[in-house]
Amino acid sequence: MRVGILINSIEVFGGIGKIAIEEVKNLRKLGVDAELLVFSDWGKENKYEEISCDIPIVRLPQRLPKSLRINRKVPFFTVWNFCHLFYPLYLPFYIKKGEWDLVINHESYLTFFLLRLKRKKIKYIQFIWDPISYIIKRVYTKGILNYLNRTLYRIGLWLDHLFIRKSEMVLTGGQAHEEFIKKTGKKYKILYPSVYPQEKINENREKFVFMMTAWKQGKNPEYVLELLEKMPELRIKMGGLWLDKNYEKSFRSLVREKKLEERIEVLGSISERDLNNYLSRATVLLQTNDDRGFGMPALETAACGCSFIIPEGQGVCNLFSNEKEGFFTREKDTERIISLLGRFLSDQVFARQMGKAAWERVKNNYSWRIHAQEIINLARGLK
């Protein structure tokens, strides 16, 4: 069996890319001929080089003549590039019939491409982390797109249903979007990601709060400044790539304007090694935006013996017990978030106990090998 794990890019670091790479690694360990397929990649860099050096990577655009390669963003949209509109039209001509028995797609907006590949006898499974309609409703609410939001939402909803119906089956990382998928009538399965827990955790925690995500419109980093202004003792290290450099520049300017440079460190994109280092030293992880995907930062945090405060409803919440290994809050429940942060920062014994409980839950229950074996079982069931 030859399997392709499809993502958009390896030039932007994020949880989906890490999940896809681990799937390829562990499928190969189990004897499957698996490859990482990269849709919109121009060969400039590999943000995952640290963890992907031992797997085959197929940069699909490199199969195209240079005259057909596109790298131009669609105005007003954070992620969309014109390649997402045009590559599905002609990239399939550069792919052999039956080149993969199955493609597992982690990005909903790449499914136009997979619909064309079905003509080449290539099946696909759709992973739903966040439906397109959900992203549109949450993210595109400012500027000119705010006036088009209702129309864009309806288009996104239609696309979600189309992509789900045409797939062999649907995978999702938790219960956050389970009801949405159920309404389509499509067969689906919840398949949780995993991590590599540290063998030994650091109990000497430093008094800072760590944050990690891909920062963009809809993630509301400005809310963090509100917390800083209300908690003089709060220190934050904020990691993660900024998808819009102008947005990052504006945020850094706002930090200086409010004279908070000494209390919040905007780290930008960091390596896997540095991420684990920060998580091993932090008092607690904080996530303030209600991101209904899976929530890999909380799982990675637990693997490093650190607890977390995250919005309730994410897929990762199904793996932990509220108030036992971490805390689930309503989005922007400022009073509750400040109370919890204060408790973690003032009571290091409590912080260590919560972090150890989270680590033990992850250490004893989750494995990438089990995740990969489940994919194999599902693939066999499609024949």
Image (tube, rainbow, N blue to C red):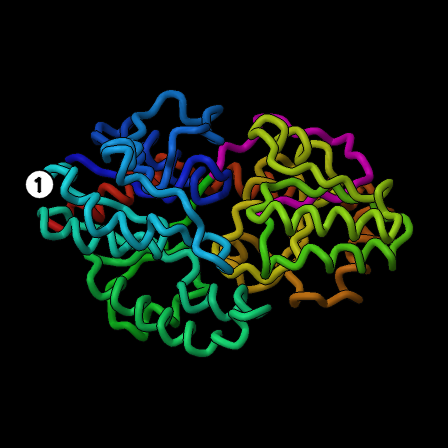
Q: Position of residue 269 (x, y in %)?
A: 60, 36
Q: Nearer the viewer, residue 63 or 365?
A: 63
Q: Is residue 213 magenta?
A: yes
Could you tell whether 77 is left or right of 311 in the image?
left
Q: Amino acid at mark 1?
A: Lys
| Residue in the picture at 31% in, 72% down | 158
Residue name at image x 35 percent, y 37 percent: 23
Quadrant (top left, top right, bottom left, bottom right) of the N terminus: top left
Q: Position of residue 311 (x, y in %)?
A: 62, 61
Residue 225: name its quadrant.
Answer: bottom right
Residue placed most toward the observer, 275 or 374: 275
Question: Relative to residue 313, is residue 367 drawn left or right?
Answer: left
Most prominent secondary structure in the magenta stretch? loop
Residue 355 picture location, percent across and down: 68, 42
> Can residue 163 be seen by looking at this rendering?
yes
Among all residues in the image, which is located at the extreme right? 232
Residue 61 position, x and y percent, is: 29, 36
Q: Residue at x 72, y 67 (%)?
A: 333
**Whether residue 334 is situated above or below residue 78 in the rendered picture:** below
Residue density around tag 1, few if under 14, some if 14–19, many if 20 or more, within 10 Å: some
Q: Looking at this view, is 353 or 380 the one in front? A: 380
Question: Label 1 belongs to which residue?
Answer: 97
Say which residue appears at 57% left-offset and 26% top-offset: 199
- Horizontal side, residue 334 vs residue 193: left or right: right
Q: Is residue 124 magenta?
A: no
Image height check: is 15 above or below 315? Answer: above
Q: How many marks?
A: 1
| Range drawn in magenta | 195-214
Q: Tell me, yes or no, if residue 27 can be seen here.
A: no
